[in-house]
Amino acid sequence: MAGFSFDRRIARAGELAQKHASVSQLLRFYQELARFQKSVCEALAKSEDHSVNGLLSHVPGLLAVVRQAGSAVLQQTAQELADLSHEEWLELLSGGWQPERQELSPECAFFVHALLQPQAEYLAGRTISHTESSPPLCPFCNSKPQVGVLRPEGDGAKRSLICSLCSTEWNFRRVVCPSCGEENKDLLPVFIASEFDYVRVEACDTCRTYIKSIDLSKNGHAVPVVDELASVSLNLWAQENKYSKLSPNLFGV
């Protein structure tokens, strides 16, 4: 994730956990998860095996993190997954690269994505990806975007998207729906709440989806994937107005 190291994510989660009591437990859990994912990335950098097979040795570590800091539901799922064989884990992880072909419960999907994300991010970081167009899906792994980013540019702001799997960031046109391509600004409402005045809920009345964008011109300390998680209360506005999130985050929200 360009410019947003694991250390920055971990530190930002701690800052927001102190500021927003309603999501402090979730953010503390994310901190522990980010520390785990950082260790996976570091191990991959030292290993010659960058395949999903190389992730199997990290399964016990993830299960331990969830048992320590996860929700009751995830802890129960961790107990069930602990009994899976290596072959069953390989099947789950391999299918995670092609989510449209694999139907998993939200709880099981959490474990698969928590393991795949650092692998995907490591692999994406070793690949130079450049495109002149503004693709709606990640140019590296073809996954949906998790969150948008606005950065100051001239008298306005430039928009980019961050992948939900490999954290690749790519440029995307400002006034266009990343789900269906709608370009009519009158059909692209934006909601901003005073509590998070730098987080935009960017919706589309054509396909009824939304994505959050983090405006770094208003808050330069924000770390998109973390601030998107901390601002989960903004999801309520979207739900009340019958919008569906383009891509749920790692925690399924």
Image: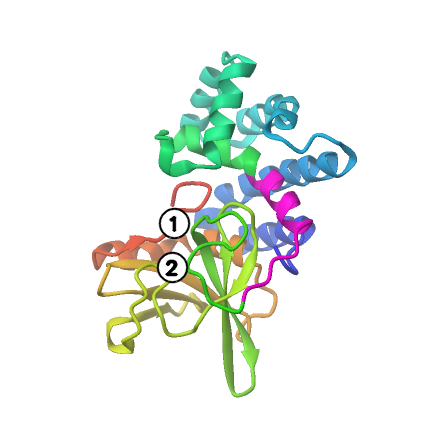
Badge 1 crowding class, 10 Å Cα cut-off, few under 14, some 14 to 19, many 20 or more, is: some
Q: Residue at x 34, y 65 (%)?
A: 177
Percent coordinates x, y for residue 250 in the rendering: 46, 42
Q: From the top left corner, tell me how far across and down residue 204 is, in percent.
A: 27, 65
Q: Is residue 79 above or below residue 238?
A: above
Which residue is pictured at 51% across the width and 75% down the height? 158
Residue 121: percent from the left, percent from the top? Answer: 61, 46
Q: Which residue occupies the extreme bottom position in the image?
A: 155
Distance from the alpha carbon under mark 1 to that under mark 2: 8 Å
> Is the residue under label 2 in contact with that under label 1 (CB below 8 Å)?
yes
**Tag shown at residue 211:** 2
Is 65 magenta? The answer is no
Looking at marks 1 and 2 on the same chain, the residue that comes earlier in the sequence is marked by: 2
Please state which of residues 87 and 24 is positioned toward the viewer in this rendering. Answer: 87
What element does badge 1 sit on? loop
Q: Quadrant of the N terminus?
A: bottom right
**239, 50: nearer the viewer:** 50
- Residue type at the position of mark 1: Ser
Which of the labelled discs sits on residue 168, or is there none?
none
Q: Crowdedness of circle 2 by 10 Å Cα count: few (<14), some, many (20+)?
A: many
Magenta segment: 117-131
Q: Amino acid at mark 2?
A: Ile
Residue at 24%, 59% (x, y): give it.
Answer: 207
Please count the marks in the image: 2
**Figure quadrant of the C terminus:** top left
Place residue 234 in its image quadrant.
bottom left
> Tag 2's secondary structure?
strand
Specify the quadrant of the image occupied by residue 233: bottom left
Which residue has dot 1 on it?
247
